[in-house]
Image: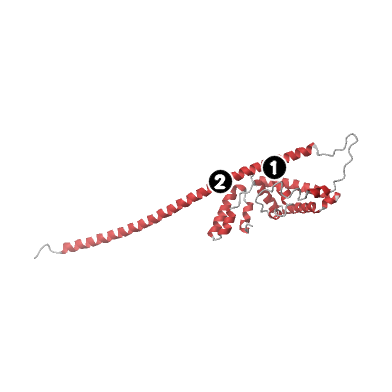
Amino acid sequence: MTSDLADSLYEIIPAEFVKARNELAKSLKAQGQRAEADRISKMSRPSASVWASNQIARHAADLVARLAEVTARLQGGVQRDRDLYAAAINEHRELLNRLRERAEEVLGEGGLRVAPPVIAAAVQNFRAGLADEAVRPLLERGRLEQDVGLETGGLLGMSAADLGSAPAPAPRQPAPSRPPHHGPTTGDHDRERERREQARALAKARAEAERRVHALRKSAEAAAAARAKQESEVNGARQRLESAERALVAAQAAEREAAAALSTAEAELEKLPAGPA
């Protein structure tokens, strides 16, 4: 698990994440915490939906806690009581709508694009993440690192057998002029198709982003290696320059001493008579 030293990274907007992560890793490495620095340097830049989910979890914890509680009820057997099940489903839907609105606000406040696929992914993070025992603790603490897939947790974590044994809400009496309708409506099909299209768009966007991150990471590593090489060459040149400067100072001192000795010798020579008296 990432150390508390990295907690602040989950609040950094995606555009500034890599710089903040690298600075923290560099600082830790300078302090001798190489293992922690290595772990932090491997953290990936969050998607906009992951970042929004973490901000909601951190700053609207009560709303997330209510959704987690309703999700637990839906997973726990309330589906066997028709009235309780219907009430829980309605509350769950209402909370997800509030989370959707909150996601729009968070993205706007962070200067990020308020796009329907991003909002849908953020809502999915809570819908499926709170139903998954492994993901829920990370999400509740605002430490999610990747979007939660549609397959995670199933439908609120309930199996097909659970859904089959759950009592259905009491059917409404159809209008006299209309026969009972037992299958999914056109609206249901449209919503399902829209959900699948959004999921495909998200998967494609994430795959493209991951490819770009991989390519940029390789470029960054190559640039770092080139920079290290240049620093080594500069250090070597600086050492050679310092050595040459020291030699120059010594030569200048020797020159001054030689000039002084020459001057003294010439003065003494002038004092001597030219020949015997």
Q: Is residue 13 left or right of residue 235?
A: right
Which residue shows up at 74% across the image and 38% down it?
Answer: 193
| Residue 104 visible at all | no
Quarter of the picture containing the C terminus is bottom left
Q: Give x and y (percent) for residue 10.
A: 64, 52
SS category of the residue bearing label 1? helix
Quarter of the picture containing the N terminus is bottom right
Q: Is residue 200 left or right of residue 227?
A: right
The amino acid at mark 2 is Leu
According to the picture, the residue beneath numbered tag 2 turns out to be 216
The amino acid at mark 1 is Ala
Q: Is residue 227 left or right of residue 242?
A: right
- Between marks 1 and 2, how big is the CA–CA gap? 25 Å
Q: Nearer the viewer, residue 74 or 152?
A: 152
According to the picture, the residue beneath numbered tag 1 turns out to be 199
Which residue shows up at 81% across the image and 48% down it?
Answer: 163
